[in-house]
Image (cartoon, coloured by chain):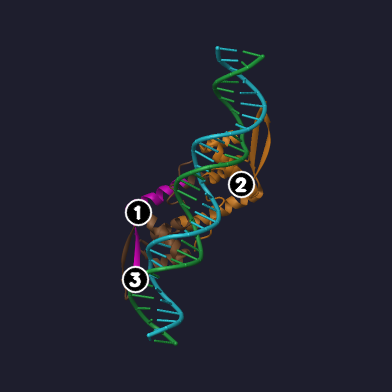
Chain colours: A orange, B brown, C cyan, D green
DNA sequence: TAAACAAGTTTACATTATAAACCTAATATT
DNA sequence: AATATTAGGTTTATAATGTAAACTTGTTTA
């Protein structure tokens, strides 16, 4: 009846991050913070969880002299996102 | 950009309960437990939260000699569910 | 009449989300 | 040239949440 929802994606902020990356394929920390409206601390933690799950990759470098953290979706992450959307539909359908 | 997700509905079990009630308008505890696959304890807690939020009503009676708890969606609950679905779309759209 | 069962509820525990506090380096300010 | 401020994060502490185990109350069944 109801498909199980991936607990990693069933989280407002992590879902928002994934949503941005599905559309952009690449986004840095500052962009994600602004796009999601999250605090830096919260974002940092959630990026970490997504990274450890293999859903995104993180590349730390510099933009000029400022540190820059670039995030990208992995194929695993995209698959997980798509599966999550499918699963959600079992809850939303009339 | 992203609409806020009602934390009361952004919960796997509570969403499942609401989903059943949106389609059925009426369901008892046992039916909900079977439809959602939840444990009775968990279901009891989540029904309580939905009731306190005014999203559902609970009517306790008897079916023969067995206690029976019938749940129904309120207009407030339906509105909340619809708003939640709308908000979710901002996360799922490509 | 005692054991098992049905329908829930309460409680305890473990996980999670979140923001406050913190760190480090770079740029302004006096 | 010292000192404050800002930018970009990370760590840690706390509060909220989800979950199932244990419990309760009444009813069948052996």
**Labels 3 and 2 within one chain:** no
Residue at the image point whose x is 31% and y is 63% from the top: B59
Is disc 1 surrounded by few (<14), some (14 to 19) or many (20+) residues within 10 Å? few
The answer to if A56 sits in the magenta stretch is: no
Report the residue marked by disc 2.
Answer: A50
Q: Under tag 2, what secondary structure?
A: helix
Residue B69 inside the magenta-drawn segment: yes
Q: Chain of mark 3?
A: B
One can see residue B84 in this view? yes
Q: Quadrant of the C terminus of chain B?
A: top right
Q: Main secondary structure of the magenta part?
A: helix
Residue depicted at 56% across the width and 40% down the height: A43
Which residues make up the magenta segment? B68-87
B42 or B63: nearer the viewer: B42
Does residue B44 sit above or below D5 in this rendering? below
Tell me how far mark 3 sits from mark 2, CA to CA. 45 Å
State how far apart marks 1 and 2 are (Cα): 34 Å
Residue B1 seen by the camera: no
User: Do tag 3 and tag 2 residues touch (Cβ < 8 Å)?
Assistant: no
Q: Position of residue B36 (x, y in %)?
A: 46, 63
Can you tell which mark lies on residue A17?
A: none
Secondary structure, mark 3, is strand
Chain on which label 2 sits: A
Tell me which chain the residue with mark 1 is part of: B
Foreground: A19 or D5?
D5
Which residue position is annotated with label 1?
Answer: B52
Q: On the picture, is A88 further left or further right than B24?
A: right
* Residue density around tag 2, few if under 14, some if 14–19, many if 20 or more, within 10 Å: many
Kind of element beneath mark 1: helix
CB-based contact (under 8 Å), mark 1 and mark 2: no
Along the line of sight, the residue nearer the viewer: B49 or B77: B49
- Tell me if mark 3 has few (under 14), some (14-19) or many (20+) residues whose alpha carbon lies within 10 angstroms of its own: few
């Amino acid at each position: 009846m109801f498909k199980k929802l991936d607990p990693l994606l069933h989280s407002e902020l992590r879902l928002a991050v994934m949503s941005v990356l599905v559309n952009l394929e690449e986004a840095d920390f500052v962009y994600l913070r602004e796009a999601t409206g999250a605090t830096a601390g919260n974002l940092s933690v959630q990026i970490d969880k997504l990274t450890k799950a293999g859903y995104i990759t993180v590349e730390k470098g510099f933009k000029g002299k400022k540190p820059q953290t670039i995030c990208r979706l992995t194929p695993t992450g995209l698959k997980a996102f798509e599966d999550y959307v499918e699963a959600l539909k079992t809850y939303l359908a009339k």
